[in-house]
């Protein structure tokens, strides 16, 4: 079954033509061209060849236009990966790494990432956490491992 955009309103057509005229060489121009060609009953395969896009992407923009109108042609930004820790947890990770284990009543005198991992989860500061994540958080906070302890970079 052939897929085409819905009938365009006059103001939509005018805006699409304006986008195509002003932005013909970027993504918005390409999307406007897809919709305009589809409104003239040009098939997905032909639009795909002309636009240099895979037919799946042509269909995606037709469906998004049909569902959301012109707003569907604008890129939607993904919010990204959720944060792993709160700022309080991040400060607690750095604070623990910056403190001598003996000051915390522990029987060893220097931190390893595995020891930090164990203490952070044991004390309920973080849920499950990997040693690599701890290392990245400490580096991001400006700490480096020097002389058997984590210290602020100079």
Image (tube, rainbow, N blue to C red):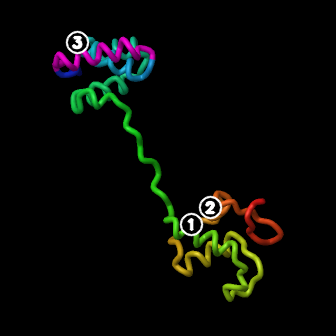
Cα gap from disc 2 to disc 1, whole angstroms: 7 Å
In this view, 113 is above or below 140: below
The foreground one among 67 and 74 is 74
> Would residue 19 be counted in the magenta stretch?
yes
The magenta region covers 7-25
Residues at marks 2 and 3, CA–CA distance in whole angstroms: 54 Å
Dominant secondary structure of the residues highlighted in magenta in the image: helix
Quarter the C terminus occupies = bottom right
Residue placed farthest to the right in the image?
147
At horizontal 61% and vertical 78% (from top left) the residue drawn is 119
The residue pinned by badge 3 equals 41
Left or right of 76, for residue 133: right
Q: Secondary structure at mark 1?
A: helix
Residues marked 2 and 1 touching at CB (< 8 Å): yes
Q: Quadrant of residue 11?
A: top left
Q: Nearer the viewer, residue 64 or 100?
A: 100
Q: Residue at x 75, y 83 (%)?
A: 108
Residue 4 appears at what percent x and percent y? 22, 20
Q: Is residue 35 rendered to the left or right of residue 53?
A: left
Circles 1 and 3, Cβ within 8 Å, touching? The answer is no
| 2 or 3: tag closer to the N-terminus | 3
- The label number, if any, that marks residue 137 in the structure image: 2
Residue 53 horizontal/vertical position (percent): 41, 20
Task: From the image, state whether disc 2 or disc 3 is nearer to you.
Answer: 2
Q: Which label was assigned to residue 61?
A: none
Dot 3: element: loop
> Left or right: where does residue 22 sit relative to residue 103?
left
From the viewer's perspective, is the residue at label 1 or at label 3 nearer?
1
| Above-or-below relation of 93 to 14 | below
Which residue is under mark 1? 90
Structural distance between the alpha carbons of marks 1 and 3: 56 Å
């Amino acid at each position: 079954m052939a897929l085409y955009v819905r009938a365009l309103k006059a103001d939509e057509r005018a805006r699409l033509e304006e986008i195509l005229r002003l932005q013909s060489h970027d993504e918005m121009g390409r999307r406007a061209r897809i919709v305009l060609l589809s409104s003239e009953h040009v098939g997905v395969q032909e639009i795909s060849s002309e636009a240099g896009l895979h037919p799946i992407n042509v269909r995606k923009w037709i469906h998004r236009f049909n569902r959301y109108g012109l707003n569907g042609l604008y890129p939607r930004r993904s919010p990204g990966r959720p944060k792993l820790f709160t700022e309080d947890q991040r400060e607690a990770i750095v604070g623990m790494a910056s403190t001598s284990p003996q000051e915390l009543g522990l029987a060893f005198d220097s931190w390893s990432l595995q020891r930090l991992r164990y203490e952070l989860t044991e004390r309920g500061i973080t849920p499950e956490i990997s040693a690599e994540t701890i290392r990245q958080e400490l580096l991001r906070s400006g700490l480096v491992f020097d002389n058997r302890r984590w210290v602020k970079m100079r």
